Amino acid sequence: EPEVTQTPSHQVTQMGQEVILRCVPISNHLYFYWYRQILGQKVEFLVSFYNNEISEKSEIFDDQFSVERPDGSNFTLKIRSTKLEDSAMYFCASSEAQGQGLTQFFGPGTRLTVL
Amino acid sequence: SQQGEEDPQALSIQEGENATMNCSYKTSINNLQWYRQNSGRGLVHLILIRSNEREKHSGRLRVTLDTSKKSSSLLITASRAADTASYFCATLKADSWGKLQFGAGTQVVVTP
């Protein structure tokens, strides 16, 4: 069964460093998402992406964050200058389309630790 | 506003018993989805119910949706130790195409 994959599974970085989290969505999906889950808290929406554009973003997704689909398979989240509070599990998700009936399938996550 | 608040926060049951958890939300929705998360792992999609549906079944799972009360329930029948996990409801608001809003989850422990 096709699945969303993410690399790395765990990333440790120093405060102020740039990190890139990578995701390979399910191959026939057109919509891509990033969510994060700070330890012990809810899963929070960051951004959705379609046709090489951001279609929706949350207030968390500020200028420090960017997303890109550099080729036909990868979808990346870049954090320009990491802060301690960026430590979280980051989940990528994808769906065939958007709207009422469409399921979002999640990857296993990347645990980001900022020291 | 908060969306998708589950209760109870934690549930401990014996194998073979049924587990019921509830989700309430505040605004109109397109759909409501239930996910499972094993400790420290990814989110596994369980079931999606659309706003015009009232009940759906998938294996041992039964989901109901009452849009007049803005609430949903997830029933796991004949629970197994492997059902031990956190369960989250996530709503897709009526004015959004893809932004899922998650609740805090119900932590379910099934003891053999």
Image (cartoon, coloured by chain):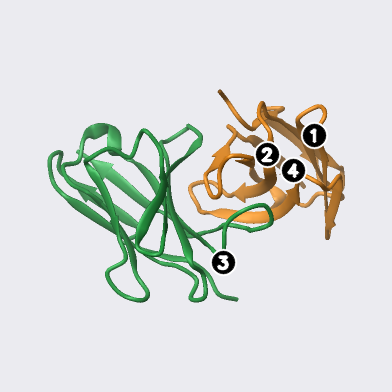
Chain colours: A green, B orange
Give the Cα separation between the discs numbered 2 and 1. Answer: 8 Å
Three-letter amino acid code of the residue under disc 3:
Glu
Left-right relation of B104 to A47: right
Instruction: Name the residue tied to disc 4.
Output: B111
Task: Return the disc, 2 or 4, that comes first in the chain's sequence.
Answer: 2
Task: Return the disc, 4 or 1, that comes first in the chain's sequence.
Answer: 1
Residue neighbourhood size for the residue with mark 1, other residues' Cα within 10 Å, grouped as few (<14), some (14–19), many (≥20) = some
Q: Nearer the viewer, mark 2 or mark 4?
A: 2
* Image mark for residue B67: 1
Task: Return the disc, 2 or 1, that comes first in the chain's sequence.
Answer: 2
| Residue name at image x 48 percent, y 47 percent | B40
Q: Quadrant of residue B67?
A: top right
Q: Nearer the viewer, mark 3 or mark 4?
A: 3
Three-letter amino acid code of the residue under disc 2:
Ile
| SS for callout 3 | loop
Q: Are marks 2 and 4 on the same chain?
A: yes
* Image mark for residue A96: 3
Q: Quadrant of residue A16?
A: top left
The reply to whether discs 2 and 1 touch (Cβ–Cβ < 8 Å) is yes
Q: Nearer the viewer, mark 4 or mark 1?
A: 1
